Image: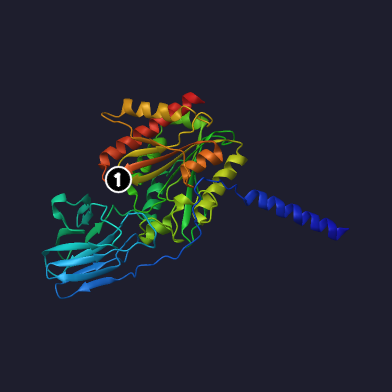
């Protein structure tokens, strides 16, 4: 009898654990295989072209340089390859370059045939922070793109976008939340390569029964303009004023400042260490980043007896655009999108919302919020070349108007 009771207790405990740790999958019209795939790692090294005294390095986090060769006495070739294929055309690069003597050189960007140059180079030089190269120094000859650059003994960083590593991100959010007791920094787990997956759980007073807003960014490593908007958005939420006090008296925000730190630090074009686009894994959760994120959010919703009402995923693309779902009437906030966009146009000078609405067919985050949580899901995209001051303005106003609308709707 004792054996039977022990067995029954073990079964009950097992079922309890399974019930607490399992997450509900969400089915999509167009499934995507997100099981891990092989990636091709770049060899970290310093490349030397002694014949002309020019050197380059990818020996830092978020670098991407797969080879560096001499073409002639005034031209070098930067060989750039993705982590694996198939992959979209986000041909990311980042390397340091210097020379024995001051000179002007041309850098030819070499990609696989099916890919084209996407990003206008950003430069970081001694005593000069990140800035876009003068477009007059970028040339195209047939399918090849060349950049004219003055080099010297001082290192120049050449990058598709500003370099923001996982460590940079950690320093930023820890500084932002310093002395803010209502922001609870936690970890949801580790990536494939053991990097931390941070979450900021933000609420004032009791968290139970407060509707939840979820924010996330950096699913795709090079998409830093979306991250810049996210930074301003979160900074605005954490200001001490009447609006934020009213908002956090009613709502709770769960936010993920870097979803794919492996991909970021490895200098990937798009994927994580498993060779997968994490923004196609919101169905079966084969990748640790999305599995642990979904588990945390859904468990917090259940424990707090609170609905997830809104999910915003910050990205970058060729232009500023909001990707939305057409299904709205049955969601927790049926009028939010229309009201939000109207408010943005009213409060940002000369601003016109660029919306592209379509119900998600592939397993992306905005579809998961809709189909899995009956919440409003939005992919918030910032253009690759959007001016940084405009990003800050839009990030600030989108946060303010979101709070105002949610306060009124509760």
Front-most of 348 and 334? 334
Query: At x 35% / y 37%, what residue is drawn?
Result: 395
Mark 1, Cα crowd under 10 Å, few <14 / some 14-19 / many 20+, is few
Where does residue 6 sit, x and y in percent of width and height?
81, 58
Please state if 115 lies on the left or on the right of 73 as rendered. right
The residue to which callout 1 is attached is 318
State the colouring used for the structure image.
Answer: rainbow
The residue depicted at 40 percent of the width and 52 percent of the height is 170
Work out whether residue 289 or residue 231 is closer to the camera in this orientation and state it.
289
From the viewer's perspective, is 287 left or right of 42? Answer: right
Look at the image and tell me whether residue 243 can be seen.
Answer: no
Residue 58 quadrant: bottom left
The number of discs equals 1
What is the quadrant of the N terminus in the image? bottom right
Residue at 30 percent across and 31 percent down: it is 352
178, above or below 110, in the image: above
Most distant residue in the right direction: 1
**Residue 15 in sight:** yes
Give the image location of residue 331, x and y in percent.
52, 32
Q: Is residue 397 left or right of residue 34?
A: left
Percent across and percent down for residue 61 are: 35, 61
Q: Is residue 206 left or right of residue 219?
A: right
């Amino acid at each position: 009898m004792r054996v039977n009771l022990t067995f029954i207790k073990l079964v009950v405990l097992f079922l309890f654990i399974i019930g607490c740790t399992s997450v509900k999958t969400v089915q999509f019209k167009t499934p995507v295989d997100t099981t891990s795939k092989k990636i091709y790692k770049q060899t970290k090294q310093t490349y030397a072209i002694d014949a002309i005294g020019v050197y380059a390095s990818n020996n830092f986090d978020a670098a991407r340089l797969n080879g560096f060769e001499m073409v002639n006495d005034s031209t070098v070739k930067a060989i750039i390859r993705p982590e694996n294929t198939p992959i979209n055309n986000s041909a990311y690069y980042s390397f340091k370059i210097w020379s024995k003597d001051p000179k002007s050189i041309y850098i030819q960007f070499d990609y696989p045939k099916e890919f084209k140059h996407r990003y206008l180079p950003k430069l970081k030089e001694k005593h000069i922070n990140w800035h876009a190269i003068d477009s007059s120094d970028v040339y195209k000859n047939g399918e090849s793109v060349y950049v004219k650059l003055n080099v010297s003994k001082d290192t120049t960083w050449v990058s598709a976008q500003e370099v923001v590593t996982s460590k940079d991100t950690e320093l930023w959010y820890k500084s932002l939340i310093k002395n803010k007791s209502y922001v609870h920094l936690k970890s949801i787990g580790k990536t494939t390569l053991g990097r931390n997956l941070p979450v900021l759980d933000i609420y004032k007073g009791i968290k139970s029964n407060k509707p939840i807003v979820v924010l996330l960014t950096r699913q795709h490593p090079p998409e830093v303009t979306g991250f810049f908007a996210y930074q301003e958005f979160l900074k605005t939420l954490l200001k001490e004023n009447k609006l934020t006090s009213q908002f956090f008296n009613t709502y709770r925000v769960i936010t993920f400042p870097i979803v794919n730190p492996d991909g970021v630090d490895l200098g990937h074009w798009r994927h994580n260490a498993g060779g997968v686009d994490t923004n196609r894994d919101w169905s079966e959760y084969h990748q640790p980043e999305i599995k642990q994120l979904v588990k945390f959010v859904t468990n917090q919703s259940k424990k707090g007896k609170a609905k997830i009402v809104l999910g915003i995923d910050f990205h970058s693309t060729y232009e500023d655009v909001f990707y939305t779902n057409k299904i709205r009437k049955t969601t927790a906030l049926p009028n939010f999108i229309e009201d939000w966009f109207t408010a943005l146009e009213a409060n940002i000078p000369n601003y016109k919302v660029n919306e592209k609405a379509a119900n998600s067919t592939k397993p992306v985050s905005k579809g998961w919020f809709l189909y899995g949580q009956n919440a409003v899901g939005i992919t918030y995209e910032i253009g690759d070349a959007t001016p940084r001051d405009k990003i800050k303005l839009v990030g600030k106003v989108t946060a303010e108007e979101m709070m105002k609308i949610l306060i009124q709707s509760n």
